[in-house]
Amino acid sequence: MEQVRLNIDGVDVVTTPDRTILEAAREAGIRIPSLCYDRRMEPYGACRICIVEVEGARGLLPACATRVTDGMVVRTDTEELRRIRRTIIELLLSDHPRDCMTCESAGNCELQDLAYEYGVKETRFPGEEHHYEVLADNPLIERDYDKCVLCGRCIRICREVQGVGVYDFVNRGFEAVPGTPYNRPLTETPCEFCGQCVSTCPTGAIISIPSKGKGRPWQVEKVRTTCPYCGCGCQIDLHVRDGEIIEVSSPVMVGPGEGNLCVKGRYGYSFVHHPDRLTTPLIRKDGELVPATWEEALGMVADRISKALDDKGPDAVAFLSSARCTNEENYLLQKLARAVVGTNNVDHCARL
Amino acid sequence: MTNSIDDLEKAGCILVIGSNTTEGHPIVGLRIKRAVMKNDCKLIVAEPRHIRLCYYADQWIRHRPGTDVALLNGMMNVILAEGLADEEFIRERTEGFEEFRKVVEQYTPERAAEICGVEAEEIRRAARTFAGAPSAAIVYAMGITQHTTGVDNVLSLANLAMLTGNLGKEGAGVNPLRGQNNVQGACDMGALPNVLTGYQPVSDPQAREKFEKAWRVDYLPGNPGLTIMEMVDAALRGEVRVLYIMGENPLLSDPDIRHLREALEKVDFLVVQDIFLTETARYADVVLPAASFAEKEGTFTNTDRRVQRVRKAVEPPGEAREDSWIIAQVASRLGYDMGDVSAPAVMEEIASLTPSYAGISYRRLEELGELRWPCPSPDHPGTPILHVDKFTRGKGKFSPVEYKTPAEEPDSEYPLVLTTGRLLTHYHTGSMTRRVKPLDELVPENRAWINPADAERLGVAADQEVAVESRRGAIKVKARITEKVPPGVVFIPFHFGESPANALTNPALDPVAKIPEYKVAAVRIVTGKAMEGLEYVTA
């Protein structure tokens, strides 16, 4: 593809013409603030936070929705731009609860970050504020539209990425807000509970119920791993606080899911800490399974395998390995069957 | 998959057959939807049930369960008759075309349509769309394989891909979706009775010799072992005395669970190594508590052959231990020292013995995030698309495949066809998802999906409890009346131990792959007083 040369904040940038100013800047390590932008979706140009000055252009341009052209000279952080962005933030905060202390998204909120970066403490535009009912009409996803900034990310990700389209803006003007058809609960819509809307919401307007109150972003350690459910192999981050998984997210544009998950991948983690987990070996005594030590249990397994080997030979022993376990564990189990016991009687549920 | 998940978005046409992709493989489903919405890809869905992908499809073919070979032969008949085949590909890269052609010529669209219960014109249209696309991908799952004709079905898909030159290039391929996080990896690692790692046959003396040397043993058996279904029968005959099950719950996932339960009771000694006391573990003589995916290091290999890391995030509860530790402990008590069984060390051993994994190491995975096999050397970037210049065996082989009926067809006694599968919200035997409270709240119980016409005829109302009975057993389950299943077909998910669909399924196997026919069994629905006389199976 042909190359385009442009200058952003005095830095010469070489990129391709399919890039937007925002993408070219980020690739060059220049951060342009944004609010309605998510790489997983088409540019929308709604929030105007990412406006930039382009020499020779009429007016200011949204960096997320403007393609680069050869010779372009872009400024992203002038006094004028900062003044306008500050005003936009003030307008957003004029109808936004100031409850960051208890908001689930504090520390993971793009509006909070913008207010912080631009030093917006108070709004000059006090006026009417919305007070919507918090919608918790299902076990997973809670919506509090008092915190909505009308970026449309939930609407767009459900439509563009998930291909479902549960949400759209309802009402007009000041009353405009994302909603479901006839404001039905999510359980009565085609919602697949993938939580893509939660993952893209820049504020605390859409949150995951199972993670509520469980921990702040700076209190968790994120561990990158692979989803344990179907064969897609989505990459997930387990958010761990004090030895407990409190949330799962997926890194944007990484792995097969590119940051998108399904209901199992995003919400199916708490089995790890379920009280039913086996915590000790069990041995059958007088018909009942009773707790035993590893020494007893392993000794018994080895004895019984040895006995079967002595009595009937290696093919009297059979192993079922597991499509749920790791490669390394499967390798070791077939090695146990073949090298140690001496049988090829090893299979797993590939057929089931 | 011959191609990758990302590559699906490059397809001009996608044929989804025997896969409820948005529920079974939601993220692949998402890519297929995006291919349709953004790239104008033509989607053909061939599936007895109305699945969500039907909303995105250019064409939905609702063929009868178990008639895939007839449908595909019919499509290929049209492709040949209308001159739509890729003759260059057939000439350069394949063999066995003439014998194949002779069989396919017998399957006129009219004859195929008759078998499948569809219109001939639908078959013609699908054939033209598929063959006319610049690249066409085939996506399938257990709806294709879980038949007594599973191998025939897959061979037919390979025939279709070769006939239209849709292998070894972008946006094409034959793409099975693997149903479990690491079913691909378990196969790659030789957790199969006939092959060692990387599909090196146990019958190959050279392969055995290599492993004997590496494993420091005098002798490895060369006769293939028993498949899972054969193990069950061998246990019932008293030939298998000890059964060691790691991380599987066959009592819910195997067909005809009553038969399986007898086998579990019959074996002298049953070891189950798992994270929960599953339905299967309740029959064990020894239960070994294992670490879950979040409590250990390792790798999984996904459906498009991507090897990716699994990382430890939390400690296992109580005395639960990693499977690798447990296996090594058993080995050492049997007099074999497995040495260092830490995940990176084991991967090194795997790489040293497995040509397709030879270039995979933890160092590279940390750096790159993923590697797709075949990855034959430490500087190899991995292989996103298989069979680019040649097939593994050299030339691609056309297989003449005749349509065969399923092992059990509906009759006057059992007039309905049962087909089984998964729901979006739950996973396999439910041992994990049914212990996740919000997921279990979303879908707390099982339903038998019944077409309104059948429901009316049988006098069954929505949510009414009915009995579904086959020659193997009966279960109690509530009815969901829905046009998502065609008349004459009942669909029951298999996640639920209290109403286990696999009490009903037919253990008849594909003769080659030994896969059971989960997707077609004959059943009847019993209501009212007659329900009282039945004996119900629960897991």
Image (tube, rainbow, N blue to C red):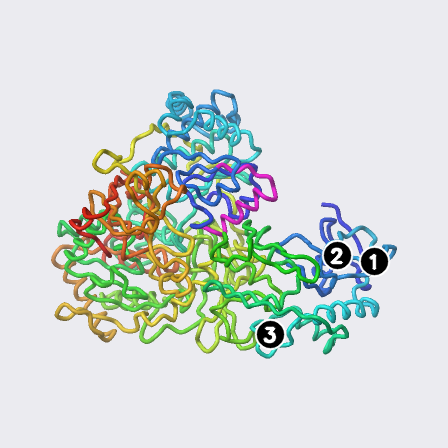
In this figure, which residue is indicated by the disc labeled 2?
A21
Amino acid type indicated by mark 1: Val
Cα distance, mark 1 to mark 2? 10 Å
- Helix, strand or loop for disc 1: strand
Q: Is residue A217 left or right of residue B421?
A: right
For disc 1, the chain is A
For residue A54, the mark is: 1
Instruction: Residue at the far right: name it.
Output: A56
In this figure, which residue is indicated by the disc labeled 3?
A106
Do callouts 1 and 2 mark residues in contact (Cβ within 8 Å)? yes
Magenta-colored stretch includes residue B30: yes
For disc 2, the chain is A
For disc 3, the chain is A
Do callouts 3 and 2 mark residues in contact (Cβ within 8 Å)? no
- Helix, strand or loop for disc 2: helix
Cα distance, mark 3 to mark 2? 29 Å
Q: Is residue B434 left or right of residue B282?
A: right
Discs 3/2, front: 3
The part of the image, by quadrant, that contains residue B335 is bottom left
Discs 3/1, front: 3
Tell me the crowding category of disc 1: few under 14, some 14 to 19, or many 20 or more residues within 10 angstroms, Cα based. some
Do callouts 3 and 1 mark residues in contact (Cβ within 8 Å)? no
Cα distance, mark 3 to mark 1? 34 Å
